[in-house]
Image (spheres, rainbow, N blue to C red):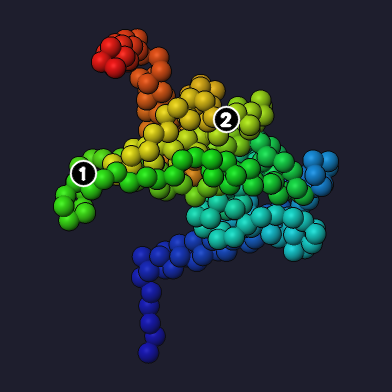
């Protein structure tokens, strides 16, 4: 028995076939797209950019391309990475001159008409190829006064605090210690003040401790002196590169600066301290 097909069905079939053909053509083009990458190669600060070409596909990130180059063209390429999910902070580098996580930087977000430049973070000593020595950060963290709990509020050994105070420090806990904020900070990157300034990452750490409603330690003198908070001129460049979206400048650094100002530079506060000392002296 003969069958007939309506014009509408025929049109739908042709449209579906055309869409499938276009999709296959797009996928074929994407699978064979080639991009140019300029990777820093060398040891201990000496080296140069070396150009590579690699096939890329839709959805690839910079780290994917680096792995492809490492596997097929430069098997001795040194690169640090771990989770490839934006949570370990290991694959920090400078992509087209901007501190980024390679695993979170999509190639489609970078200009296709020029090479993708990848180099190690400039604020820290170079080890090899794309790897920088970030151990200074861990030594710096040890110099920050640790958490010291205040006495309990109740006889049963528990504390009382407001939910707002609890919520305030939660943002700082998102830090993955990728050190991109350290790398972009001009105090460390350009002026090399590593001996005088702890950098935005550890100002966030200090803020998490200082604003903790259970903490009783006083870190304000250290912030002014040993930690060098005065070097920060709140350009917010650290906030812009944070992959976790922590508002480093507004929520951590500026409140800490306010505490330093209140403690050491507030004229009213100074008068109160002077008269308090006088009264103590007279009473003695």
Residue at horizontal 37%, vertical 21%?
A: 263
> Is 38 left, or right, of 240 in this rendering?
right
Residue at horizontal 63%, vertical 54%?
A: 63
Q: Badge 2: how crowded within 10 Å, few (<14), some, or many (20+)?
A: many
Q: Is residue 282 above or below residue 130?
A: above
Q: Position of residue 183 (x, y in %)?
A: 61, 37
> Is 85 left, or right, of 254 in this rendering?
right
Tell me the SS state at disc 1: loop
Q: Position of residue 176 (x, y in %)?
A: 49, 50
Residue at horizontal 33%, vertical 42%?
A: 215
Q: Nearer the viewer, residue 95 or 189?
A: 189
Q: Earlier in the sequence, mark 1 or mark 2?
A: 1
Numbered tag placed on residue 161 in the rendering: 1
Q: Position of residue 103 (x, y in %)?
A: 57, 53
Numbered tag placed on residue 197 in the rendering: 2
Tell me the SS state at disc 2: loop
Residue 271 visible in the displayed image:
yes
Q: Is residue 131 above or below residue 257?
A: below
Residue at horizontal 31%, vertical 14%?
A: 281
């Amino acid at each position: 028995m003969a069958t007939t097909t309506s014009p509408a069905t025929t049109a739908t079939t042709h449209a579906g076939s055309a869409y499938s053909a276009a999709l296959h053509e797009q996928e074929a083009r994407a699978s064979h797209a080639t991009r140019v990458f300029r990777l820093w190669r060398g040891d201990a600060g000496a080296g140069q950019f070396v150009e590579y070409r690699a096939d890329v596909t839709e959805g690839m990130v910079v780290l994917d391309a680096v792995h492809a180059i490492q596997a097929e063209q430069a098997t001795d390429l040194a690169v640090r990475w771990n989770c490839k999910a934006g949570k370990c902070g290991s694959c920090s580098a400078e992509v087209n001159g901007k501190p980024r996580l390679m695993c979170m930087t999509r190639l489609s977000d970078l200009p296709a008409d020029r090479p993708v430049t990848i180099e190690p973070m400039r604020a820290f000593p170079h080890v090899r190829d794309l790897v920088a020595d970030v151990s200074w950060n861990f030594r710096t963290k040890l110099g920050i006064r640790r958490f010291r709990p205040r006495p309990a509020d109740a006889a049963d050994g528990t504390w009382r605090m407001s939910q707002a105070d609890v919520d305030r420090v939660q943002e700082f806990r998102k830090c993955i210690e990728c050190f991109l904020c350290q790398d972009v900070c001009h105090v460390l990157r350009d002026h090399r003040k590593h001996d005088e300034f702890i950098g935005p990452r550890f100002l966030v750490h200090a803020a998490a401790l200082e604003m903790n409603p259970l903490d009783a330690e006083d870190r304000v003198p250290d912030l002014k002196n040993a930690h060098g908070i005065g070097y920060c001129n709140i350009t917010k460049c650290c906030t812009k590169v944070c992959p976790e979206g922590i508002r480093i400048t507004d929520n951590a650094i500026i409140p800490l600066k306010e505490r330093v100002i209140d403690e050491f530079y507030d004229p009213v506060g100074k008068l109160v301290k002077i008269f308090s000392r006088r009264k103590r002296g007279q009473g003695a």
